[in-house]
Image: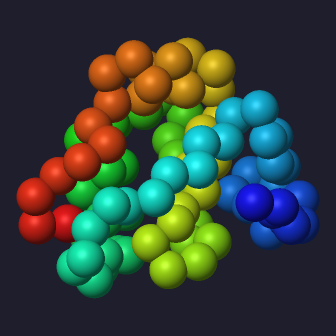
Amino acid sequence: MRLKYRRKNWYGGGFDPTLCLIRRFLTNKLVITHMMKDNIKGIWSLVKGVEIRAIKMGVFIFQLFHKLDVWKVLSGGLWFSINI
């Protein structure tokens, strides 16, 4: 998948592709985007935060802002939840 982005549109004015995760929800249900964002931000409770944007239906880009936050999410972050 090719990703087009504009650096100025991200929180904090910067975009670092090395701190991005692209994930897809494997469900037949509709993903309620604002609820998913609130749940994930609350569960992960990252030091520098996360910006979540929809790329297309069910596919999201998670822009993290620190290497330790990426490690925390990949090593033990919640990637699924009921009622998102």
Q: Give left or right: position of 38 versus 14.
A: left
Residue 39 is drawn in which quadrant? Answer: bottom left
Q: Position of residue 15 (x, y in %)?
A: 81, 48
Front-most of 13 and 72? 72
Quadrant of the image for the C terminus?
bottom left
Is 69 placed above or below 25 here? above
Picture coordinates of residue 59, whole percent (x, y): 52, 66
36 lies above or below 23? below
Closest to the observer: 69 or 60? 60
Q: Position of residue 75 (x, y in %)?
A: 39, 17
Residue 8 visible somewhere in the drawing: no
- Residue at the farthest left position: 82
Q: Residue at x 55, y 34 (%)?
A: 48
Q: Estimate the x, y position of residue 36 in percent, counting from the top left.
A: 30, 65
Q: How is the image coloured?
A: rainbow
Residue 24, visible in the rendered structure: yes
**Could you tell me which quadrant the N terminus lies in?**
bottom right
Q: Is residue 61 above or below residue 59?
A: above
33 is higher (above) or lower (below) than 1: below
Residue at the location (86% across, 67% down)? 4
Q: Quadrant of residue 64?
A: top right
- Number of marks present in the image shown: 0
Q: Tell me the residue at 17%/52% (across/down).
A: 81
In the rendered structure, the answer to whether residue 21 lies left or right of residue 9 reads left
